[in-house]
Image: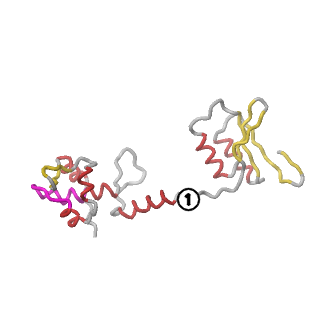
C-alpha cells in the first residue's frame, strides 16, 4: 500500500506469476480501494496470451506493473472499463441468426458441424434439385426456394453437393443426396 495526501491509497499485489489466484486477490482488494495494481516479474518475452491477459485486467479495472532488476514498468493503469462495441461483428452475428430457420444447433456439443444459414440455404437448393434428374437453372431454383443467391451457391459449390453437367443447368451430386439423407431440409424461405 502507498499513501500520499490528498491522493487515494494505491494497492500493489506483488507475486511471482500472473495467474488466477493473483487476479482474484486483486479483485478482492478492489472491494476496499479503487486503485489496485498487480505486479509480476518482467518475463524475458511475453507469450501470445499477453493481449488476452491485459484485456481481462482492463475489463476488471486492475492495473499491471512488471518488475525487472529493480525497475518497475507500467503496462496498464486501473480504470473503470467501458467495452467498445464491435458494431460490424455484432451486425454480422445478428444477420446470421435472423437468416436461420429455427435453432437447429444443440448447445454444448463439440466436434460436429454447425448448422449455419448458408448450410440451410444449400440444403434448400439440394432438396429442390433432388427430384429433378435433368437438373435446372439457378433462376428457377431461386424462385422455387427463395434463395436469392442460388447462382452463387451452385457456382461456388462449397460443400460439393452440386454438379454442373451443362451450361446453365445444375443437378444434385451423390454428396448432395447424402447431405439430404443426413439433414432434414429446412422449409423454403417465405
Quarter of the image that includes the C terminus = bottom left
Question: Residue 61 vs residue 156: left or right?
Answer: right
Report the residue that reaches farthest toward the front. Answer: 167
Report the residue that reaches farthest toward the left. Answer: 134
- Residue 183 in percent (x, y) is at 26, 54
Question: Residue 75 vs residue 152: left or right?
Answer: right
Secondary structure under the numbered disc 1 in the rendered image: loop
Of residues 136 and 67, the one drawn nearer to the viewer in this rendering: 136
Report the residue that reaches farthest toward the right. Answer: 5
Q: Residue at 29% across / 58% down in the picture?
A: 120
State the extent of the magenta-drawn residues as a range. 123-138
Circle 1 Cα neighbour tier, 10 Å, few/some/many (<14 / 14–19 / ≥20): few
Number of residue marks: 1
Q: Residue at 76% across / 37% down in the picture?
A: 72
Question: Residue 114 vs residue 47: left or right?
Answer: left
Confirm whether the magenta stretch covers residue 63.
Answer: no
* Quadrant position of residue 15: top right
- Residue 16 in percent (x, y) is at 70, 33
Of residues 7 and 25, the one drawn nearer to the viewer in this rendering: 7
Display colour scheme: secondary structure
Confirm whether the magenta stretch covers residue 125.
Answer: yes
- Residue at which label 1 appears: 85
- Residue 21 in percent (x, y) is at 66, 41
Question: Residue 186 vs residue 71: left or right?
Answer: left
Quarter of the image that includes the N terminus = top right
- Residue 86 in percent (x, y) is at 53, 57
Q: Residue at 35% across / 55% down in the picture?
A: 116
Of residues 102 and 75, the one drawn nearer to the viewer in this rendering: 75
Q: Residue at 80% across / 48% down in the picture?
A: 10
* Quadrant position of residue 84: bottom right
Amino acid at each position: 500500500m502507498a499513501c500520499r495526501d490528498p491522493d487515494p491509497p494505491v494497492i500493489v499485489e506483488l507475486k511471482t506469476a500472473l495467474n488466477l489466484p493473483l487476479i482474484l486477490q486483486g479483485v478482492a482488494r478492489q472491494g476496499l480501494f479503487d486503485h489496485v495494481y498487480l505486479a509480476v516479474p518482467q518475463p524475458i518475452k511475453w507469450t501470445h496470451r499477453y493481449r488476452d491477459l491485459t484485456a481481462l485486467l482492463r475489463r476488471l479495472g486492475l492495473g499491471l506493473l512488471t518488475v525487472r532488476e529493480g525497475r518497475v514498468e507500467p503496462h496498464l493503469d486501473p480504470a473503470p472499463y467501458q467495452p467498445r462495441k464491435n458494431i460490424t461483428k455484432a451486425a454480422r452475428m445478428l444477420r446470421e441468426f435472423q437468416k436461420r430457420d429455427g435453432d437447429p444447433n444443440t448447445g454444448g456439443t463439440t466436434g460436429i458441424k454447425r448448422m449455419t444459414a448458408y448450410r440451410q440455404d444449400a440444403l434448400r437448393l439440394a432438396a429442390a434439385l433432388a427430384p429433378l434428374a435433368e437438373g435446372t437453372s439457378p433462376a428457377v431454383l431461386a424462385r422455387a426456394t427463395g434463395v436469392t443467391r442460388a447462382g452463387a451457391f451452385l457456382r461456388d459449390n462449397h460443400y460439393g453437393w452440386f454438379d454442373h453437367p451443362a451450361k446453365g443447368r445444375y443437378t444434385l451430386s451423390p454428396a448432395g443426396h447424402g447431405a439430404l439423407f443426413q439433414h432434414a431440409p429446412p422449409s423454403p424461405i417465405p
